[in-house]
Amino acid sequence: MIFRVASQAVLLIAAAYCIQMVSSAATTKVEERDVESDAEILRKCLHEVGSKDVVGELQKVARYSKWTSEEIPCFTRCLASMKRWFDADESKWNKQQIADDLGADMFNYCRYELDRYNEDSCEFAYTGLRCLKQAELYTLETYKNILSCATELNVTMKELQKYAAFPTKEVVPCLFQCLAEKMDFYTPTYEWNFDKWVKAFGPTRQDPTASNVCKVSSEQINKRDKCEWMYEEYNCLERLNYNTDGSYPMETTTLSAVITSKKPDAVEAAVKEAS
């Protein structure tokens, strides 16, 4: 009996990690979920993949965020399927369901990763859920830095939301330059730290080399206002790599998706931390 109770406790703890693994981003929808239901999904998925060492497998689940490859083969495919986010038979993501459940910022962050078809449905499910976990971590970091810059520049939320309209000229002068410096988008010689851009905004639609068309020349960098050319590069990269033709549930800029998806309590907490 003691072992059974202990096993149930471990299972619920792992279920909590499991929830965090895929859907604990900056939305209160997670708080409305039934933990018992998630625990049942976990039980079913471990059974489906034929796990015999349940405690050992639960320990693996608990450190999911540190996985560099799927440590429980096909586990994430089962999990994503049970959440109705992934069609295992078609090896296809249900993007609208993800958007509805997790929010615009999480979806926007991973939308192109979820489009990179892989006939190996287990691997495809794993890379997709790994991206969603990264989205949980990195969109919050981007958001905190945006708020920090907004505080420094006395910018209102209404002004921030204007970034959704793809303005050619930056609506809040030097806001993006502030963000770029806080998130190390550039080297000291103003080359791109492209991995930092991807962490902030998500996997790109285009191959990184295709993005070179957006790079301002060294001559222009030396002659022009830094805030101006940095925003120009961002605007170009946003259009090239992230914005769509209307085929996605939420068509907006990456910054706008991050900004508008946050709940009031998340805003207040982030503002306090940014101050």
Image (spheres, rainbow, N blue to C red):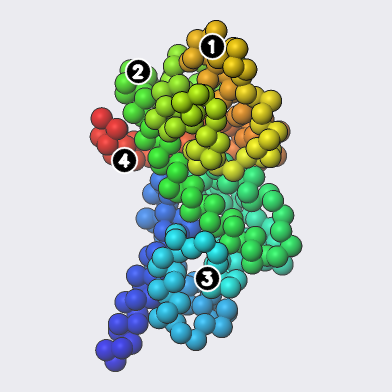
Q: Report which quarter residue 19 is drawn in.
A: bottom left
- The answer to which of marks 4 and 3 sits earlier in the sequence is 3
* First along the sequence among labels 3 and 1: 3
Q: Element at badge 2?
A: helix
Q: What residue type is labelled 2?
A: Leu
Residue 152 visible to the viewer: yes
Task: Check if mark 2's residue and mark 4's residue have beta carbons within 8 Å.
Answer: no
The CA distance from mark 1 to mark 4 is: 42 Å
Residue 249 at x, y = what percent?
62, 41
> Mark 2 highlights which residue?
153
The residue carrying mark 3 is: 71
Q: Is residue 109 shown above or below 171? A: below
Horizontal side of 101 relative to 36 (left or right) equals right
Disc 2 to disc 3, C-alpha distance: 46 Å
Q: How many numbered discs sit on the rendered protein?
A: 4
Mark 2 burial class by Cα count in 10 Å: few <14, some 14-19, many 20+: some
Q: What residue type is labelled 4?
A: Asp
Cα gap from disc 2 to disc 1, whole angstroms: 24 Å
Residue 119 image position (x, y, % from top left): 74, 62
Instruction: Tell me the tag on residue 265.
Output: 4
Residue 54 vertical placement versus 274 (above, below): below
* Residue 145: quarter of image: top left
Amino acid under disc 3: Glu
Q: Which amino acid does label 1 sit on?
A: Asn
**Is label 3 in a helix, a strand or a loop?**
loop
Residue lying furthest top: 223
Q: State the CA–CA distance, disc 2 to disc 4.
A: 22 Å
Q: Is residue 166 visible?
A: no
Q: Residue at x 64, y 51 (%)?
A: 114
Q: Residues within 10 Å of mark 1 (few under 14, many from 20)?
A: few
Can you identify the residue that label 1 sits on?
222
C-beta proximity under 8 Å, tags 2 and 1: no
